[in-house]
């Protein structure tokens, strides 16, 4: 529910836990989204400003953020790379803290603009854009003391929380449709790559696209390259510039073998 605090800040209040349902979601939020850790440079989780308790329910108060982060479409390649690098920063931060999201898609990314006037040319150049990854209710967190080989899950993410899988509304990572253990961290990367593939397939047909064909073709070639098992996600932002490398996957984003994230 949207709300406004006594000091005039726009916020969103969200039900996180009711009884035992939502316990892991709350655990993840408390670990990554509160206090000093919530404002770590590479942490792109939506911060929790306050918890509210009512009976057996726990609510989280979040800053009010905007959705549809790809609207209007990115003006140039630097805006595309800024989004991709911030998104990878956020996913890498989750994985470094042994949290897998399991629901990565464009509608779960938010940014620090909630106004209506998005039709302005070069919209994103008028403020420092900060992208966030929200909707952590399907996430899973492992203990730092756990054996890296044991950091796997089985089945559909919604089944784990007692919800009808038909309500997922996502393309399934192949491993989610059977009963064999799989690595949730690699499942995240499959979802992220799948999201980018759909974004730029759409980009080819957008009438208001600002990229020429050669630029989009170059982006497709980069996204089509396979990741290698001996590389980890490492993203750095220094002096106003961004650069990075991505890894921890194999060939066709298989999530059978789970790498150590410790």
Image (cartoon, rainbow, N blue to C red):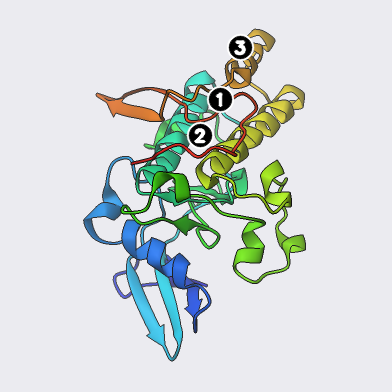
Percent x, y for residue 11?
42, 66
Mark number, residue 108: none
Question: Helix or strand or loop: what does disc 1 sit on?
Answer: loop
Instruction: Work out how far the residue at label 1 is from the one at label 2, CA to CA, in angstroms.
Output: 8 Å
Mark number, residue 75: 1
Residue at 32% x, 71% y: name it: 50
Percent x, y for residue 250?
57, 26
Instruction: Work out how far the residue at label 2 is from the one at label 3, CA to CA, in angstroms.
Output: 24 Å
Tag nearer the camera, 1 or 2: 1
Residue 259 to residue 65: above or below: above
Q: Which of marks 3 and 2 precedes in the sequence?
A: 2
Tag nearer the camera, 2 or 3: 3
Percent x, y for residue 171?
73, 45
Residue 12 to residue 52: above or below: above
Residue at 68% x, 45% y: name it: 175
Which residue is farthest top?
214
Q: Which residue is mark 2?
A: 123
Of residue 24 and residue 128, the one placed in the foreground of this image is 24
Percent x, y for residue 31?
32, 60
Question: Helix or strand or loop: what does disc 3 sit on?
Answer: helix
Tag nearer the camera, 3 or 1: 3
Q: Is residue 173 visible?
A: no
Q: Is 245 situated left or right of 32 in this image? A: right
Residue at 66% x, 35% y: name it: 194
> Marks 1 and 2: CB-CB under 8 Å?
yes
Which residue is farthest left?
36
Q: How many numbered circles does the render carry?
A: 3
Q: Which residue is mark 3?
A: 218
Residue at 72% x, 51% y: name it: 178
């Amino acid at each position: 529910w949207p709300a406004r605090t006594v000091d005039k800040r726009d916020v969103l209040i969200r039900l996180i836990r009711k009884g035992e349902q939502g316990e892991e979601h709350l655990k993840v939020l408390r670990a990554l989204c509160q206090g000093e850790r919530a404002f770590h440079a590479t942490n792109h989780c939506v911060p929790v400003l306050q918890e509210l308790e009512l009976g057996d329910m726990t609510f989280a108060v979040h800053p009010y953020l905007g959705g549809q982060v790809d609207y209007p479409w990115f003006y140039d390649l630097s805006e595309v790379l800024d989004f991709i690098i911030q998104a990878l920063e956020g996913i890498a931060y989750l994985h470094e803290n042994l949290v897998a999201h399991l629901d990565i898609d464009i509608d779960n990314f938010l940014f620090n603009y909630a106004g209506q006037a998005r039709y302005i040319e070069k919209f994103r150049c008028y403020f420092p854009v900060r992208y966030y990854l929200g909707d952590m209710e399907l996430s899973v967190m492992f203990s730092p003391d756990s054996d890296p080989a044991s950091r796997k899950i089985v089945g559909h993410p919604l089944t784990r929380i007692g919800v009808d899988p038909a309500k997922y509304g996502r393309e399934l990572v192949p491993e989610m449709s059977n009963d064999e253990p799989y690595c949730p961290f690699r499942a995240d990367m499959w979802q992220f790559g799948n999201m980018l593939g759909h974004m730029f397939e759409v980009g080819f047909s957008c009438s208001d696209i600002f990229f020429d064909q050669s630029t989009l073709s170059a982006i497709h070639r980069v996204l089509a390259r396979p990741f290698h098992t001996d590389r980890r996600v490492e993203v750095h932002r220094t002096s106003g510039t961004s650069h990075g490398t991505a890894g921890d996957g194999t060939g066709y984003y298989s999530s059978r073998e789970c790498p150590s994230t410790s």
